[in-house]
Each structure stands twice: as structure tokens, then as C-alpha cells.
Image (cartoon, helix red, strand yellow):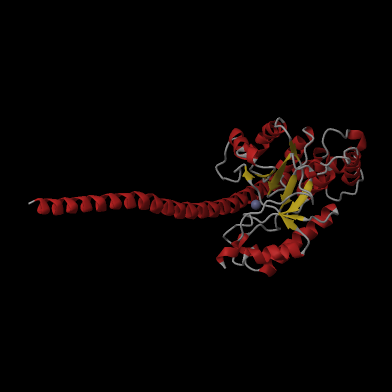
Amino acid sequence: MSDLESVSRRKRVNTLKKLIILLLVTLLVIPIVMCILMFVRMTSLEKELREMHTQIDQIAFEQSKYRETLDNHMEQDKQASAAAGDAKGKVTGEGNGNLTQEGSAQTVPEQSGEGQADGQTESDGQTVVAQSDLVAKVSTAETQYNPELDENIRKVYLTFDDGPSENTDEILDILAKYNVKGTFFIVGKEGDMAEDAMRRIVAEGHTIGMHTYSHKYSQIYSSVDAFAEDFLKLQEHIYNVVGVRSNYFRFPGGSSNEVSDVDITELIDWVHGQGIEYYDWNSSGDDAVGAGFDAETIVDNCIRGIEKYKVFIVLLHDAKNKQATVEALPMLIEKIQAMENTVILPITEHTVPIQHTTKETEE
Ligand code: ZN
């Protein structure tokens, strides 16, 4: 009897043991499996998010371009109907600067701000020289100490993509008011408005960067040759307008964009081969989103996580329909300037580039 009893007890103990082991294994395995599943999901969501950002960038760009064309047409219509009436008055009023078109002469006083009163309506070439002289004087006084080389200081770089547009002027006014220098990754735009803005960017000590001439993904990312052609076209355009060769580049959609038909590392190699560095961002105002955030949200988006970084490159847009960005800028600058050990700088050859992951893992 006792033997039988002990056998059955051992059996029970064994089954109990097995149950406990099974339970432990399940308790261990389930979280591990969950973790793996969640990690996989997260990676795919991150990829999706990146793709969405890229698409948003393209849509926003096209939207602003469309609006610009629309406005230009309306402007042309207006001018055409007004031309018959007051053409004579304009011609006699503007003097004999080196500007050839009536249209462009009209825009000069607007561009050059309140500093130059009516007495000195010289060509804008001369005003540019005067302003850059001023910048040069100010900057030589500061040559002893370069905060950009100071590792203890947080460097914030405000970068503006997709311009120039009318908003560029407003942004330049704000930057001037706060004595802050920024970086403008421009696209190819011809005409007085765009070219005056480009000249102003350089004359006022900001950095002019390249963001491709066409910004058309299907074109620039179709082959290395197509990319190179577009790239050189913008570089040439900048040189012709401002007499400066830009050494800074930003890939439309960022260097981690998933839309490129060519391996983006080939494009990166090509860019580096030109002696040019590219810069992505580690902060975004998310102001490229079509519907648009309000100014406060853009500021919050920009400075989120700033405490973690010593180099903080902020992505903003100065395209035509980015009015909220213009509104956000003074608030943003004030908040950053109130932070300890933090300076706002333009991108220079000393700037540590922020570069997103590239496509190399896919090949
Ligand atoms: Zn862009």
C-alpha cells in the first residue's frame, strides 16, 4: 500500500514539477517573444514614419510651388491691367541704377529695409557691400573666441529649406532683429525676389546652402548623373547671383529618404567628391506638414529634446506658405537664447554634421 502511495505521490510531484517548469518557461518566453514582436513592429513603423516625412516634404514643396505660381499669375494679371495706367510714372521716378526692368526697380526699396532712406537709392549691389562691411567689422571683434569650437557649449543651427520666397525676407528681418545667423538651403528660383533674397542671405552673414535646383524626387534621385546635373545647376545659379560657391548641401527628404532609385551612398560619395558636406537635422519644427501646426506647436516641436544634444540642427522651411514658421521664429529664438550655455550659429566648415542613416544596409 505504502509503495503504491509513494509511487503515486512521486508521480504527482513530478507532474507538479513539470507544470512549474512549464509555467516558468512560458513566463520567460512570452515577454521575450513580445519584445521581439514589438521591436520588429517599431522598426517598421519608424520606416513608415520616415517615408511619410519624405512624402510630406515633397507634397509641401509642391504645394508651396503651386501657390507661388498661382500668386505669380495673379500678380501678372494685376500688373498687366495696371500697366496701361501708370507705367510712365514709375519709369521717371526710379532714377538710373543698373536695374533694367521696371518691375525689379520697384522691389528694391522693400528689400533693403528701413535703414536706407530715400536719399540713397543706389543699386542693391552697393547696399550689399555696405552691409557686409558692417558684418565683417562686427565679426573681427569676435575672432578671439569661437563658440563653435567650444565643446561645452550647445550649438543650435536654425536651417530653412525650400526658399527663397517672400517669407525669406521676413525671416531675415527677424534674424537681424535678434542678431542671429541662420542657414538657408535654397532651391533653384530665378527672378528678382528670389535673387535679392539670396544676396541678402549672404550679405547679412548667413550661410547659403543647396537643396537641389528642382527638388523633384523623380528627377534628382533617378540616377547619379541626373542628380549631378541638377546639383551643379543650382551651384552655378548661386555663384552667378551672389558670387559665392556654397559648400553645404541638404538632400531633399533627408539623406535617409527611401525614394531614391540610386543607392543614396553613391550620391553621398559624389557630393563629398565635390568637397561638399551634407547636413540632415536632429530637430524639426514639422512645419512642412500641409495642414500646418500653429506657431506655438512649431516652437515646441523644435526644442523638444534639446537638452540631450550639444549639436542641434533644427529643420524649418521658408517656402511661401510657411507663415506659421515666421510667427514661430521670434518665440523660438527667445526660448533658445534664454537657455544656458547655448548659442545659435550658422553652419560653417566647423559644424559637426548631423547625418541620418543611409541606404547602405539595403544593398
Ligand atoms: Zn525640401
Residue 258: x and y, percent? Answer: 57, 60
Question: Is residue 260 visible in this depiction of the protein?
Answer: no
Task: Please say whether residue 257 is visible from this viewpoint.
Answer: yes
Of residue 146 and residue 107, the one placed in the foreground of this image is: 146
Left or right: where does residue 87 sit relative to residue 75?
Answer: right
Name the spot of residue 106 as percent of width and height, x first: 81, 42
322 sits left or right of 84 in the view: left
Q: Residue furthest front?
A: 2
Tell which of 299 and 97 is nearer to you. Answer: 299
Name which residue lies at 92% across and 34% down.
Answer: 119
> Which quadrant would residue 320 be assigned to in this image?
top right
For residue 40, which quarter of the picture?
bottom left
Q: Tell me which residue sits at (29%, 53%) in the image.
A: 22
7 is higher (above) or lower (below) than 127: below
Q: Is residue 305 above or below residue 352?
A: above
Q: Residue furthest left?
A: 1
- Residue 137 percent location from the top left of the image: 91, 39
Pick the front one: 169 or 222 = 222
Q: How many marks?
A: 0
Residue 103 vs residue 339: left or right? Answer: right
| Quadrant of the rendering where the C terminus is positioned | bottom right
What percent of the width, then of the height, locates residue 77? 69, 47
Q: Going by the image, does 349 lie left or right of 310? A: right
